[in-house]
Image (cartoon, rainbow, N blue to C red):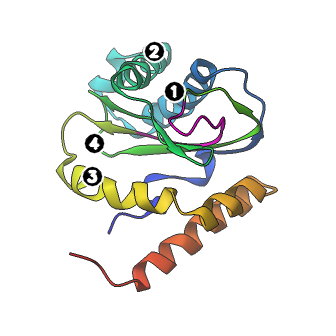
Amino acid sequence: MLKFTELLSPENIRQGLTCTSKKRAFEIISSLIAKQLSEQIDGLEADEVSLQEKETLCTDSLLNREKLGNSSLGNGMAMPKGRLPLGNTPIAVFLQLSAPLKYDALDHREVDLIFALLSPTEHCSNLVQELPHLVERLKDKSLIKQLRNAQSAEEIWQIFQFSDRQAETLPTTE
């Protein structure tokens, strides 16, 4: 079972963030992911791609994937995804917005919670299999309420840790 805390780090959580558009949210997400990629990639690959280029790659990937289908999960939660030709592990970012954004969601609700996931172009067969389970967990109304009401990034991290522990105790349907 894939855990939120395997994809997300406390440094990639933002609480009460002011954001004016979906594109701006994707740029913030891309900035955080590019920074983490720069810290984790060693050697020639890191030297060949600047921080700015990594941010652009991330933003373009999220925007291009969004054109294929809206990433809203309903109830004000979205899960934009993208692929990158860099790194070897998926990286997530979570944003709790101070005010909801227009998101063209199927349920017509604005989005104020965003769990973004960028994964490497290679090495993600396990992620593809586990993604539906992760999406179902993000759609949980109780989890959404807790994340929406959290007062700090640390509290959000603790909510994800607790959710992971709960998911471990649930029987699998496979």
Of badges 1 and 3, nearer the viewer stands 3
Dot 1 or dot 2: first in sequence order is 1
Residue where numbered disc 1 is placed: 30
Q: Which residue is pictured at 62% across the width and 47% down the height?
A: 11
Looking at the rendered structure, the secondary structure element under dot 3 is: helix
Dot 4 or dot 3: first in sequence order is 4
Of badges 4 and 2, nearer the viewer stands 2
Of badges 4 and 3, nearer the viewer stands 3
- Magenta highlight range: 105-117
Mark 4 Cα shell of 10 Å, populated few (<14), some (14-19), many (≥20): some
Q: Amino acid at mark 3?
A: Leu
Residue situated in front as seen by the camera: 45 or 160: 160
Residue where numbered disc 3 is placed: 127
**Percent position (x, y) of residue 155?**
73, 63
Distance between the Cα atoms at labels 1 and 3?
A: 20 Å
Q: Amino acid at mark 2?
A: Thr
Looking at the rendered structure, the secondary structure element under dot 1 is: helix
Residue where numbered disc 4 is placed: 88
Residue where numbered disc 2 is placed: 56
Mark 3 Cα shell of 10 Å, populated few (<14), some (14-19), many (≥20): some
Looking at the rendered structure, the secondary structure element under dot 2 is: helix
Q: How many marks?
A: 4
